[in-house]
Amino acid sequence: MKTAQIEKRLSDLFEEWSGEEPELLLPLAPSGSDRIYYRLQSAKQSAIGTYSPDPREQAAFLAFSRHFRAKDLPVPDIYAEGEKVYLQEDLGSTTLYSYLLQKGDYFPDYLIRIYQKVVEQLARLQITGGEGLDYSYCFPKQTFDKQSMFWDFNYFKYHFLLPSRAGYDEVALDKDFHALADYLLEEDASHFMFRDFQTRNIMVKEGKPFFIDYQGGRRGALQYDLASLLYQAKANIPADIRHDLLNHYLDVAQDLKSLDREAFVRYYYGFVLIRCIQVLGAYGFRGLYYRKEHFLKSIPFALRNIKWLQDHTELFDRLPELNKALNTIIEAKTYEPFDKIKGSSSLLTVTIQSFSYKKDGIPEDQSGNGGGFVFDCRFIHNPGRYEPYKKLTGRDEKVINFLRRHTTMDDFLNNIFRIVDEAVENYIDRSFTHLMVNFGCTGGQHRSVFAADALAKHLKEKYGVHIELKHIAQERKEWKN
């Protein structure tokens, strides 16, 4: 469905529900699915509008939401629904993941308190929420069974181990997978399993956690979601805090059902392992095959979780081939990040510029090197063609979300990152002093500004090199559009 059709459906649904036309229809940052989200606001009302192309996914989310809401669980209220669209409660813009981005190198007390609230509500969602739930809405399976586990195992094998050139005996590895699955299936799998319980799916409003995006849920073991949360790769939660949060969860869960803590913990680390396997498969598919930088950055953290399991549990004693394949990758240090100290102490300065083909032309290289990379953004769908975006720039949220959701900008930038990264690493090694990268679009206002900012952020985070960022057209206008 085209963007204009989606927005018309959501606007009509909002007006039908609220009695007012929306004054704001703001595309939100894309998720990892095909769903498209908008914030709709009128003078008195606000809602999140969702376009959901899969009818089964929409039916599951709406049914689960209403069931959980009736049990006073922290999920959004559903306001209205139509064909492939629905409106849900606006829980704001703050996710638990956004807290992690701000935490720095240590794990602050306030963040621990938020995690405590999250695991408390998780136990309620799984145990209380699972009671009386209509699991017929679940897809593609109603239970996280052996077939489901093998989908994850094969995803991991072919999208991570194989492109990582780990080397493995197919028969021996398959034997390990059967052993792990059979072990995990000994545990009770009669509760609601969120399936993708991670910080991007946890909103924080007025200090309280709310859960979203549980349409992939099914019956399963309690341990899986807790493992997903506490061993989320880039969360990088210290081991002692993870241990305390595990015990805090168990204290709450024991008030809701009879629980053998020792048995729970014994199986828990097996579920940590299968979750690590699942996410490495996803990171491999999206990072190694599609070269999406965010997923590539997460691989080292996931491997560190694997290493912790190797060092602190006996799981791998019964999984020798899997252990050997993972050790090959860990010892090769293929995915370890670039040494930022080396980058920040190098002689290299990267000049990144946005410009207007119409007003400026390709910028001259003032370094005396005769030029650098020039990337033409004019083929990318232009938000400047639409009235709501004409006076904005590539730094405004509306434009950023438009470019990320309704254009090929992310794929374009992923390809550019690969090209420029190779040059930057080479120039650092050879003690070169300057590299220039230019992005041009028609007016130098939307697409080129966003692209230049994105590359500057990427290079600074990955290499620590000195960046000179210039927006030629916008600085000439003093950013007045």
Image (spheres, rainbow, N blue to C red):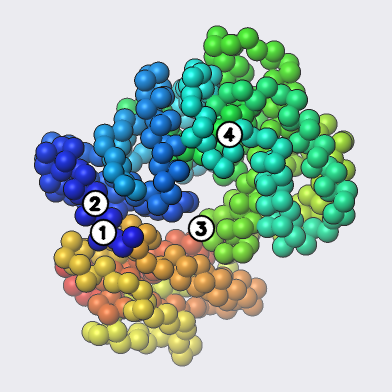
The residue under label 4 is which amino acid type? Gln
Mark 1 — residue? Answer: 5
Answer yes or no: do the residues labelled 3 and 1 have beta carbons within 8 Å? no
Residue 39: give x, y in percent of width and height.
26, 46
The residue located at (65%, 25%) in the rendering is 189
Is residue 204 among what the camera can see? no
Mark 4 — residue? Answer: 142
Q: Which mark is residue 461?
A: 3
The residue located at (45%, 43%) in the rendering is 56
Residue 206: give x, y in percent of width and height.
32, 27
Query: Is residue 212 shown left or right of residue 186?
Result: left
Q: CA distance from mark 4 to mark 2?
A: 31 Å
Question: As displayed, is residue 13 above or below residue 479?
Answer: above
Nearest to N terminus: mark 4 or mark 3: 4
Question: As displayed, is residue 349 above or below residue 80?
Answer: below
Question: As displayed, is residue 53 above or below residue 469?
Answer: above
The residue under label 3 is which amino acid type? Glu
